[in-house]
């Protein structure tokens, strides 16, 4: 993410947290199109992509990773530790693969990941994260989020318990920092790609 920040033009359409929220309908519409891609790689049709299916997915996308890197990618996206990548988790997986391909020396054309509209959506989500990453550390902290939630209107600040609750929803591993992966998981839940398949929030 630090590399992404350095390589970006520095221009963003985001001025506040509200400007990000206003994009939720657009995000939802484009990310829903990933359903067909998910079903393509879910060869046994059980609603989960297992390790072997992931390897085949990466092979078809011509993404070459070492065995341990594939395992790391699988387990980092299997947030409920079910030993299978569900649809919402697959969205995160596909975005991470897109970033790996887009910002590597691989000759792979990114059009193989998805449509140009989907790739543009991934890029916009990255820009949203970078906008919230006030100190450029590559991870969001609570101070960053409180500032983002309150900077839209100094007269109408979000109650402390709301900003704290939102941050906890994003901080999946409770380490006080929110990575891009955690941010994307939370964003998918917030926009409600498929209410029946949302990843349960911690403590629910």
Image: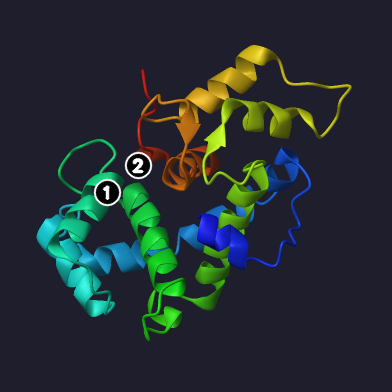
User: Which residue shows up at 76% across the image and 28% down it?
Assistant: 150
- From the viewer's side, name the closer residue of 25 and 149: 149
Q: Measuring 41% from the left and 26% from the top, which residue is drawn there?
A: 175
Whether label 2 touches label 1, CB < 8 Å: yes
Q: Nearer the viewer, residue 196 or 58?
A: 58
Q: Which mark is residue 51?
A: none
Relative vertical location of residue 16 with respect to residue 107 in this rendering, above or below: above
> What whole-number distance in Å separates the C-alpha atoms at marks 2 and 1?
8 Å
Task: Look at mark 2 in the image and give the residue it sits on.
Answer: 197
Left or right of 5? Residue 10 is right
The reply to whether residue 44 is visible in this rendering is no
Which residue shows up at 56% across the image and 56% down it?
126
Quarter residue 163 falls in: top right
* SS at mark 2 in the image: helix
Count neighbours of disc 1 (C-alpha within 10 A) and say few if under 14, some if 14 to 19, many if 20 or more: many
Q: Whole-percent x and y of residue 55?
A: 16, 66
> Is residue 132 shown above or below 163?
below
Which residue sits at x=20%, y=37%? Answer: 81
Q: What element carries label 1?
A: loop
Colouring chosen for the image of the structure? rainbow
Q: Is residue 174 left or right of residue 71?
A: right
Q: Mark 1 points at which residue?
A: 86
Mark toward the viewer: 2 or 1: 1
């Amino acid at each position: 993410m630090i590399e992404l920040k350095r390589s970006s033009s520095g221009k963003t359409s985001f001025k506040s947290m509200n400007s990000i929220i206003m994009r939720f309908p657009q995000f939802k519409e484009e990310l829903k199109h990933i359903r067909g891609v998910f079903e393509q790689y879910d060869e046994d049709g059980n609603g989960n992509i297992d390790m072997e299916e992931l390897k085949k997915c990466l092979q078809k996308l011509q993404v070459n990773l070492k065995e341990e890197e594939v395992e790391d990618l699988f387990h980092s996206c299997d947030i409920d530790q079910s030993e299978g990548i569900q649809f919402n988790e697959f969205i995160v997986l596909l975005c991470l693969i897109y970033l790996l391909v887009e910002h590597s020396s691989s000759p792979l054309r990114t059009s193989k990941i998805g449509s140009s509209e989907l790739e543009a959506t991934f890029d916009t989500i990255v820009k949203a994260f970078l906008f919230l990453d006030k100190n450029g550390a590559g991870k969001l902290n609570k101070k960053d989020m409180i500032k983002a939630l309150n900077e839209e209107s100094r007269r109408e600040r979000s109650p402390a318990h709301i900003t704290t609750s939102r941050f906890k929803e994003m901080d999946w591993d409770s380490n006080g920092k929110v990575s891009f992966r955690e941010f994307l998981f939370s964003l998918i839940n917030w926009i409600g790609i498929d209410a029946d398949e949302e990843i349960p929030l911690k403590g629910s």
